[in-house]
Amino acid sequence: MVTTTWNRHHVISLADFQPDEYDTVLHTAASFREVLSRRTKKVPALQGQVIANLFFEPSTRTRSSFELAAKRLSADTLNFAPGTSSLTKGETILDTAKTYLAMGTDIMVIRHREAGVPLMIANEMDRLETRVGIFNAGDGLHEHPSQALLDLFTICALIDPEKPRLSLLKDKKIAIVGDILHSRVARSNIWSLTASGAEVHLAAPPTLLPKLFADFVHPQQPFPDKKSNSSTFPSLSLTPSLPHSLTPSLPRKLFLHWSLEPALQNADFVMTLRLQKERMTQHLLPSLREYHQRYGITRERLEACHPDVKVLHPGPVNRGVEISSDLMDDPKFSLISQQVTSGVAVRMALLYLMGSGKS
Amino acid sequence: MVTTTWNRHHVISLADFQPDEYDTVLHTAASFREVLSRRTKKVPALQGQVIANLFFEPSTRTRSSFELAAKRLSADTLNFAPGTSSLTKGETILDTAKTYLAMGTDIMVIRHREAGVPLMIANEMDRLETRVGIFNAGDGLHEHPSQALLDLFTICALIDPEKPRLSLLKDKKIAIVGDILHSRVARSNIWSLTASGAEVHLAAPPTLLPKLFADFVHPQQPFPDKKSNSSTFPSLSLTPSLPHSLTPSLPRKLFLHWSLEPALQNADFVMTLRLQKERMTQHLLPSLREYHQRYGITRERLEACHPDVKVLHPGPVNRGVEISSDLMDDPKFSLISQQVTSGVAVRMALLYLMGSGKS
Amino acid sequence: MVTTTWNRHHVISLADFQPDEYDTVLHTAASFREVLSRRTKKVPALQGQVIANLFFEPSTRTRSSFELAAKRLSADTLNFAPGTSSLTKGETILDTAKTYLAMGTDIMVIRHREAGVPLMIANEMDRLETRVGIFNAGDGLHEHPSQALLDLFTICALIDPEKPRLSLLKDKKIAIVGDILHSRVARSNIWSLTASGAEVHLAAPPTLLPKLFADFVHPQQPFPDKKSNSSTFPSLSLTPSLPHSLTPSLPRKLFLHWSLEPALQNADFVMTLRLQKERMTQHLLPSLREYHQRYGITRERLEACHPDVKVLHPGPVNRGVEISSDLMDDPKFSLISQQVTSGVAVRMALLYLMGSGKS
């Protein structure tokens, strides 16, 4: 089905993804999307293989998407329920992973509250010279690569449904709005979107802007002073200096803003992020209502964008907070349903690529 | 397999079920019951389709029955666990349903504590012009149509195993005993059983008699006075006036009693209902012991019934409360096991009919 | 695949297992282990059959192993989650089992905190003249037969991978170390290992030595005095008198020790048992550290054993308590991963033998 090369056992992070790897995922997902439109939405690609969903941090939505992707590839699935697990009996996470390895699991889909757990498990699996694949389904504040890849597929497939590819986003303007500081979704999206050559604009209240991204920022450019007024602070236009080894040929265009307006101006896509309600008890936010007033996406605010602007959200949405409720339900603007549908196709593609690399 | 017509996308309520629809379900369930007696109890009818069990109100027993029915039709199943779901993150029920829709779910089986939730979701799915089917697996005090249909199948298949059909119940006397006020099972059963032409007799303590059924009752007939003595109060013989549009040609024979005796007299079937223990803390019942003394079904009480009387219960039974323990285990009287077996066949039939309507 | 006879509907206990039954399990597991090494790790042996995992006591690890075994035999699986079950609604365990029976379950895998529950259910299933098989997945302090059989398979297959058989263990010395008093794993292992003709040496602190095994001990031989010093107490060499009906021809060699040294001396295999941390609050143990100092298995302690000694543990391991952490990860000594792998093959074998007996 796919003629391009794919050499990854694991999908942990998009930081070192190369353009042809993005394109391989996009092509493969496009062919699986076609499978999903059939009455019998299954292919025998991974028959007899076992995919274990180890969701140490629970998530029905993401787990269902992975489970469905696995079943449509005809794999057998195992669900690990942390509440009733050996972890409460004092077993380490690595020992849990090794148990599923020894049972004959082919791919482990891992979600964990702590950044780095999937990588730690992948390293151990490689050290043991196993052929098991580790799929990061979200680790702490680090990354959520399948979410970023389904976002990428959703917008590329909107532009060219037949041949979604990375280069379609070149020179598009994409705004990412919300709690960027605590968002593994944003982190993964920044890697994929800047790799495409798009202009990526981050907009957030100062308390929710990443200090973590300091290493994205060129040293000559000072990080915005947190004490200055967020709405008047000028937007920064920074070209981050990335580790040389990764993608030296890729100029990355990343911009940070403390107000919404410069990010939305002529934007082609607006990606909103889920706001965790516990941010309020952490005194990072005054109230949901004030957040919506200053950073919520509404029909009025979209008027500054490109006329064909589309809005995305990784779900679940706090209606009336990140996005106004009527906008969320308006198919002219909202890509939220398409994101969910893309999620199954993209996860099928990634599981297929990981699983096929084994034979 | 089935030549009769079936036009329902959704199964929400039996209130507007027509006699030929009941017969279609009964015929189809009979052929699936035959499948279940084989060693390989599967058919490929729904291969590649996805059935999501969204049990907002947990129920292992009913969920297992639906899951098994789906698997025996070769569908893929997804289980939604409310404890670990996005609902705790503030997502609305409709958004949850739309997420499963976008993943490609073909049928959603929905159980919820609130009456009306499955209908609300079905209406939204129709408004969005989707082809997804909604199956009400119990909503608040409203309805539990698959339970009533499996009860119907159980008694019709007892009378004529080869050709179970609605008309077999014409002029049978069926008693429904217990907490009718809070029973969605009773509500659905009243629709199906009165549609068959059977005499349906409801018996309950006054505190557990439905005010909700006032609209069943002909206006000329006053509702029994709650203050009079329940055991001496004469039984009412009412022909309810139903909405004209529904089944104008069907005379429905429904009788209400505050004591057990008139309901059991010559009864062919006695349907008992589960008593929720929280009714006591709500001061609707003095004690389980007193309930059993006055409304519990025992061998002695069955002597007033037809000699071939059978007893049903939707499960799980509080042994020694609704039914005496020895009676429950006596295959001469108890149809409880057959009900569970019928449940898988009837749910296969309904999922099959809903799923086939899509192609 | 298997030519030997097998007449068991149920697998409840190893107390009455005969040598040829052990060999049948070992042969069958060896052929399934071969299946597991293929890319497509499935056989259609139990297609269309239903295996219900009724884990009244939760265990993700064991449940996953059974679920995977069932899926690789192409059976459909149902998982019973006690937290959301009818049991909280007052249903008895037997009624729960009868519900799964009536749904058409072919094999029920049962784990329960109370000893005797699987046997009670098996007896009821037989009384009802059903053909359902009951598989004890651990009942209280009683037995855990599949764990003992996977331990047996692991060590026999190490000695002769092609033809694992019981007689390979004749005259081997096997030490079982740890909380024998509370271990259903030890109890099942004692039956299988002594049946093989191996010398079985139990070593535990006096507070964790079984009074339950008094009936293993020949009446002429007094049970060790609990008040004497454990480390100096001479090891007993007892040939237990077993019920005549069982295996009169089998001499069983079982030895009890209150210190580790005599058990480890020249041992071929050391089986460690999981230490429940609640034993400390029960004042049966001073501390985990002291336990490790006196009974923990370390590289140094293994020097007294046979040079090729191997260490087993049923998992999950408390690292640094039952076994030192580095030893656990050393493939020269540790068979822990192989045990997990064997678990799937052995459970496939048992489910296959139980399921095939039905046709």
Image (cartoon, coloured by chain):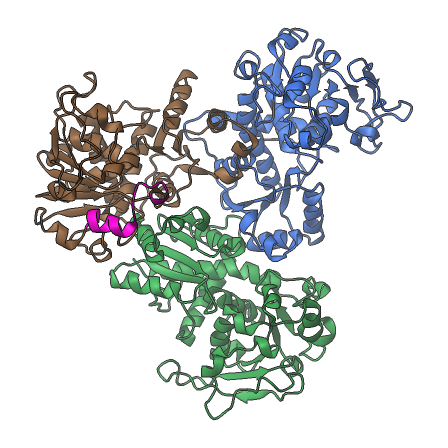
Chain colours: A blue, B brown, C green
Which image quadrant for residue A310? Answer: top right
Quadrant occupied by the C terminus of chain C: bottom left
Tell me, yes or no, whether the highlighted magenta stretch contains residue A77.
no
Q: Residue furthest right?
A: A220
Instruction: Indicate the quadrant where residue A271 lies.
Output: top right
Front-lying residue, A330 or C253: A330
The spot of residue C353 in percent (x, y) is: 38, 62
User: Magenta span has B283?
Assistant: yes
> Does residue C170 sit above or below B158 in this rendering?
below
Query: Percent position (x, y) of residue B52?
Result: 43, 34
Q: Looking at the image, which is closer to me, C227 or C145? A: C227
Magenta residue span: B280-297
Q: Is residue C171 above or below residue B166?
A: below
Depth check, front residue: A2 or C335? C335
Q: Is residue A73 visible?
A: no
x and y, in percent, of residue C183 in the image: 53, 70
Please report the residue visible at 64 percent of the width from the left and 18 percent of the height from the top.
Answer: A292
- Position of C273 with respect to C87 (left or right) is right
Left/right of residue C297 with respect to residue B157 in the rendered view: right
Identify the residue shown where x is 38% and y is 63%.
Answer: C118
Q: Nearer the viewer, residue B175 or A221?
A: B175
In this image, A138 relative to C135: left or right? Answer: right
* Rendered location of residue B41, percent (x, y): 31, 46
